[in-house]
């Protein structure tokens, strides 16, 4: 067993494996993308790329970042990664929780700082896969829309709170994705950072595949036919509040979405003032445009 571990680690260190981490972010069609990748993983393998989605990562590593940095664990983790790469020249890992979970989003010391633990976790990951270069790829989303989607997900998963409590003290115009993206480019071992706007997801999907899988990208028909997750209508959110006040618990959002789906009769939940949304959209556009102009980060457009 010791020989097998040493051999796998040596393989990881001596073979040039291009490793791409699809790091989310949450609520940017990650589940839609991961499902499409999983459905076609055998096709990708024929093209020289092993794919590891969140189910496999959580099965093999559990909370991966908690083990990173521990000398007694690193050899085991390197062996697992080498085995899972299956001798392929490229390895794609998709797991949005690598950079943090919803708890990190909502309980940080600065609510406008998205994923405050992301740089620490990615630094550990880069150390784990060294000397192989690490490519980080992720989607970003306009903050007003992003936080509404996060709130919807909390209701869907049974973690109820009112919108007023959720949004208290949160200024979406102050949220800057560049606050975590620029530091990513400085992590030793990170060779490239690529991003795309969630709002452009359908249009730039071929470029996203190129970034994640490398070349040559196989032809994959009908990847975008399946719908993205629908959010909640205003009536659905109101129903969750009513039911919770009456003592009901569980996945209230999931039930309410079925009863009051977004439609002409039930408009989508849109709690932010229109003027604030416009201001946030402008700040978001300026933030991402500045990253593209600086040539520090590849913006897929």
Image (tube, helix red, strand yellow):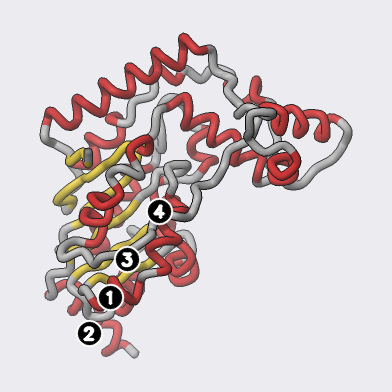
CB under 8 Å between discs 1 and 2: no
Among the two numbered marks 1 and 2 on one chain, the one whose residue lies closer to the N terminus? 2
Residue 179 shows in this picture: yes
Residue to which mark 3 is pinned: 71
CB under 8 Å between discs 3 and 4: no
**Left-right relation of 186 to 138:** left
* Front in this rendered view, residue 215 or 65: 215
Q: CA distance from mark 3 to mark 2?
A: 17 Å
Of helix, strand and loop, which one carries label 4?
loop
Residue 101 locus on image (x, y percent): 49, 45
Q: Is residue 178 above or below residue 184?
A: above
Residue to which mark 2 is pinned: 7
Residue to which mark 1 is pinned: 45
Residue to which mark 4 is pinned: 224
**Residue at 37% from the left image edge and 35% from the top image edge:** 199
**Left-right relation of 233 to 14:** right
**Left-right relation of 120 to 270:** left
Among the two numbered marks 3 and 1 on one chain, the one whose residue lies closer to the N terminus? 1
Among the two numbered marks 3 and 2 on one chain, the one whose residue lies closer to the N terminus? 2
Q: How busy is the neighbourhood of tag 4: few (under 14 within 10 Å), some, or many (20 plus)?
A: some
């Amino acid at each position: 067993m010791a020989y097998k571990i040493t051999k796998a680690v040596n393989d990881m260190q001596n073979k040039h494996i291009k490793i791409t981490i699809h790091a989310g972010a949450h609520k940017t069609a990650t589940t839609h993308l991961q499902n499409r990748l999983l459905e076609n993983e055998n096709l990708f393998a024929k093209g020289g790329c092993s794919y590891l989605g969140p189910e496999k990562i959580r099965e093999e590593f559990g909370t991966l970042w908690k083990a990173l940095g521990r000398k007694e664990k690193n050899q085991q983790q390197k062996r697992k990664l080498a085995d899972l790469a299956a001798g392929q020249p490229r390895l794609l890992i998709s797991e949005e929780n690598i950079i943090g979970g919803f708890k990190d989003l909502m309980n940080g010391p600065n609510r406008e700082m998205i994923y405050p633990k992301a740089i620490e976790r990615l630094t550990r990951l880069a150390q784990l896969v060294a000397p192989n270069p690490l490519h980080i790829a992720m989607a970003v989303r306009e903050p007003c829309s992003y936080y509404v989607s996060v709130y919807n997900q909390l209701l869907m998963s049974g973690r109820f709170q009112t919108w007023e409590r959720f949004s208290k003290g949160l200024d979406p115009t102050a949220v800057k994705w560049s606050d975590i993206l620029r530091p990513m480019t400085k992590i030793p071992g990170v060779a490239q950072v690529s991003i795309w706007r969630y709002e452009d997801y359908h249009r730039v999907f071929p470029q996203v595949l190129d970034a994640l899988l490398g070349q040559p990208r196989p032809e994959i028909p009908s990847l975008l036919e399946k719908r993205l997750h629908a959010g909640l209508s205003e009536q659905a959110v109101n129903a969750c509040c009513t039911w919770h006040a009456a003592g009901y618990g569980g996945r209230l959002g999931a039930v309410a979405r079925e009863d009051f789906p977004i439609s002409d009769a039930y408009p989508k939940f849109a709690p932010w003032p229109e003027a604030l949304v416009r201001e946030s959209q402008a700040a978001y556009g300026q933030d991402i445009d500045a990253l593209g102009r600086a040539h520090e980060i590849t913006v897929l457009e």
